[in-house]
């Protein structure tokens, strides 16, 4: 049995796949601990995972409230966001906690690609086996850009964290991003082939369908709308969304004369007054709802689009920011839906695509069920004696100093 320490950040689309992966590892007999945002504690513990909160529920909501300005923001704004939300302190906490929980020969470290730098910091300091897990292709496509951002705007903070655990500064962030023992991509092969493929180092395992509803009950009001072949509208569970998204989506549904279910965690994002036949829900059990709707109009989150594709539900994507345009283009290339960039958002154009989706064929792709393959790949790292692969990025003097520290059992 291995001990697996996992770290992830973001909204439900970033955290739920890790909860599902943790459950798959637990089912294979491993002890799993998840480090993530406080509101996910109940869900993680319900799945049998140990849980350590990296923030409070209030801090998490404040963090989400600060994310909309990041859409299209320049490098200084990202540093300010990290500083305002205490994210450098959070990374330092995650790194220290992971190192304290590490048992040589038994522990595997797993982190969300890009944000979980704590996972690779700890792995480098401990010479521990580590995996970085990506949930969307843009995480690999933007590696050099993110590495540049870290080097230009955040390296002083990161250097202090690393110095505290006995590590020298990162000299080549682009190379460091590729230093995990294992890279896992949680999306299916058809999605990978519909755009720029993942790098050769990556193990493509398939999508986990991380939106499992648990004990969530379908409200009677939703049942009534589903019986009328309604449209599902959702911009995800976070706040990192263009402020016109729901306005355009609601107008498009009204233009095609369809009722709509708006699954939106934050009520203030939705127009105050909704047309007849449209209702707001703070959350819905997507495994039950998505296969029954006439179409889904959404923001382009990968969890939502994979759920729609595996349910055979036509989809229209209003894409703005981060991975959403890339995801929309892949959905269109695979013949599973259509998308609009923000520059072309209008009720008329969105309604035209929605009408086509509602009247066109329903194309379903098989669910890959990537959790088993991902869990098997991760458990294969247990007991690994391969030195951490960032070692080649150090100078000879730095390698010798780190080797002496590891032999002595020191952490800094």
Image (cartoon, rainbow, N blue to C red):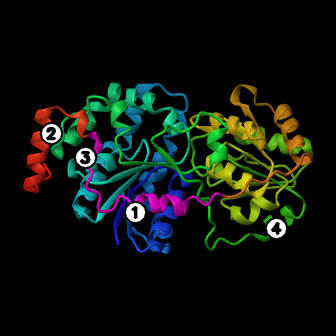
Q: Is residue 375 magenta?
A: yes
Q: Which marked residue is nearer to the observer: mark 2 or mark 3?
A: 2
Q: CA distance from mark 2 to mark 3?
A: 11 Å
Q: Nearer the viewer, residue 75 or 104?
A: 104
Left or right relative to 228: residue 70: left
Q: Residue at x 75, y 69 (%)?
A: 219
Residue 240: image x %, image y %? Answer: 57, 41
The reply to whether the C-beta atoms of the residues labelled 3 and 1 are less than 8 Å apart is no
- Describe the element under mark 3 as helix, strand or loop: helix
- Describe the element under mark 4 as helix, strand or loop: helix
Q: CA distance from mark 1 to mark 4?
A: 42 Å
The reply to whether the C-beta atoms of the residues labelled 4 and 3 are less than 8 Å apart is no
Q: Which marked residue is nearer to the observer: mark 1 or mark 4?
A: 1
- Describe the element under mark 2 as helix, strand or loop: helix
Residue 216: quadrant of the picture: bottom right
Residue 212: quadrant of the picture: bottom right
Mark 2 is surrounded, within 10 Å at the Cα level, by few (under 14), some (14 to 19) or many (20 or more) other residues, namely some
**Would you name the residue on which mark 2 appears?**
399
Left or right relative to 211: residue 23: left
Residue 12: image x %, image y %? Answer: 55, 55
Magenta part of the chain: 368-390
* Label whose residue precedes the other's in the sequence (1 or 2): 1
Q: Is residue 37 magenta?
A: no
**Would you name the residue on which mark 1 appears?**
379
Q: CA distance from mark 1 to mark 2?
A: 27 Å
* Label whose residue precedes the other's in the sequence (2 or 4): 4
Residue 223 is tagged as 4
Q: Residue at x 42, y 26 (%)?
A: 75
**Would you name the residue on which mark 3 appears?**
124
* Label whose residue precedes the other's in the sequence (4 or 3): 3
């Amino acid at each position: 049995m291995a001990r697996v320490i996992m770290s992830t950040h973001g909204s439900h689309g970033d955290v739920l796949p890790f909860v599902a992966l943790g459950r798959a590892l637990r089912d294979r007999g491993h002890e799993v601990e998840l480090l993530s945002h406080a509101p996910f504690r109940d869900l993680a513990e319900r799945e049998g995972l140990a849980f350590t909160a990296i923030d409070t529920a209030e801090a998490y909501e404040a963090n989400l409230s600060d994310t909309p300005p990041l859409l299209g923001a320049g490098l200084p704004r990202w540093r300010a966001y990290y500083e305002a939300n205490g994210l450098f302190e959070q990374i330092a906490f995650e790194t220290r906690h992971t190192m304290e929980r590490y048992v040589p020969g038994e522990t595997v470290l797993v982190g969300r690609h890009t944000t979980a730098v704590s996972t690779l910091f700890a792995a480098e300091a401990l010479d521990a086996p580590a995996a970085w897990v990506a949930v969307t292709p843009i995480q690999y496509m933007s590696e050099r850009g993110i590495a540049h951002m870290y080097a230009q705007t955040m390296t002083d903070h990161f250097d202090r964290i690393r110095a505290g655990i006995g590590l020298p500064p990162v000299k080549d962030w682009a190379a460091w991003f590729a230093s995990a023992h294992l890279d896992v991509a949680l999306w299916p092969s058809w999605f990978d082939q519909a755009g720029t493929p993942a790098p050769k180092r990556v193990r493509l395992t398939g999508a986990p369908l991380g939106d499992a509803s648990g004990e969530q009950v379908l409200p009677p009001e939703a049942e009534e709308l589903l019986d009328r072949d309604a449209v599902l509208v959702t911009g995800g569970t976070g706040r990192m969304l263009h402020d016109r998204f729901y306005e355009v989506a609601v107008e498009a549904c009204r233009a095609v004369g369809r009722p709509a279910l708006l699954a939106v965690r934050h009520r203030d994002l939705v127009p105050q007054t909704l047309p007849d036949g449209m209702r707001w829900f703070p959350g819905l059990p997507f495994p039950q709802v998505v296969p029954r709707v006439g179409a889904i109009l959404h923001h382009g989150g990968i969890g939502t689009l994979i759920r729609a594709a595996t349910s055979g539900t036509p989809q229209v994507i209003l894409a703005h920011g981060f991975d959403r345009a890339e995801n929309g283009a892949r959905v269109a290339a695979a013949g599973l839906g259509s998308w609009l960039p923000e520059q072309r958002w209008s009720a008329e154009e969105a309604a035209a695509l929605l009408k086509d989706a509602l009247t066109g064929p329903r194309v379903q792709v098989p669910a890959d069920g990537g959790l088993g393959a991902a869990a098997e790949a991760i458990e294969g790292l247990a007991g690994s004696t391969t030195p951490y692969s960032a070692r080649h990025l150090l100078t000879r003097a730095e390698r010798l100093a780190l080797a002496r520290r590891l032999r002595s059992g020191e952490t800094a």
